[in-house]
Image (spheres, rainbow, N blue to C red):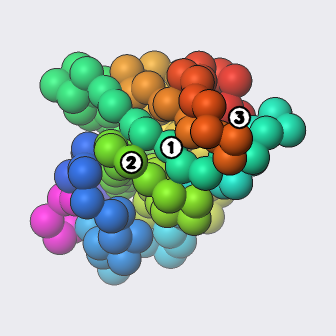
Amino acid sequence: MPMIRSAAPPLISRDPIDLARLVAAVEAPEAGGIATFTGLVRNHHQGRGVSRLEYSAYESMAEQEMRTILSEAESRWAVKVVATHRLGTLEVGDVAVAVAAAGAHRAEAFEACRHVIEELKRRVPVWKREQYADGSEAWVEAREAQ
């Protein structure tokens, strides 16, 4: 689907994620729908209180894999998709990851958005360390943190 988009948001960022920037990057006259996913830092995991998270990554590999996933989605559906994952220390309520997918119809936008976030969590080398309310901390596998 030939869509004109604004400047692409970063794939990886240490700054807060601007969801409006992601949406603007996929908006186009041909787009009848834009689906978004916003992943937030929650205050619990497996019954434990979480006070903050720290994300780290193998950045060049993470960016390359994110480009591959976005390209796969754009090849599979008639959509334009962007995504940004945050790194660094995040507090409860902060946006950790965001995806925006635009398509002529809502179904393809929803499907592509879901595909991108699921593949991002499965394949991109981003690691999460949770800091708990009791002062302890642990690294968490992406598959554990669904």
User: Which residue matches tag 2?
Assistant: 89
User: Which residue matches tag 3?
Assistant: 146
Q: Rate crowding at label 2 as few (under 14), some (14 to 19) or many (20 or more) other CA atoms within 10 Å.
A: some
- Considering depth in this image, is 57 or 108 the residue closer to the camera? 57
Spot occupied by residue 58 in the image (x, y as percentages of width and height): 25, 21
Q: Rate crowding at label 1 as few (under 14), some (14 to 19) or many (20 or more) other CA atoms within 10 Å.
A: many
Specify start and end residues of the magenta stretch as a single range: 4-9
Vertically, is 20 above or below 45?
below
- Considering depth in this image, is 79 or 138 the residue closer to the camera? 138
Residue drawn 43% across the image and 39% down it:
54
Question: Which kind of residue does numbered mark 3 sit on?
Answer: Gln
Q: CA distance from mark 1 to mark 2?
A: 6 Å
As drawn, the label of residue 97 is: none
Residue drawn 33% across the image and 64% down it:
16
Spot occupied by residue 51 in the image (x, y as percentages of width and height): 61, 51
Task: Give the image quarter of residue 136.
Answer: top right
User: Which residue matches tag 1?
Assistant: 53
Question: Which kind of residue does numbered mark 1 sit on?
Answer: Leu
Task: Please name which of the two marks, 1 or 3, marks the residue nearer to the observer.
Answer: 1
Vertically, is 89 above or below 109?
above
Task: Please name which of the two marks, 3 or 2, marks the residue nearer to the observer.
Answer: 2
What secondary structure prevails in the magenta region? loop
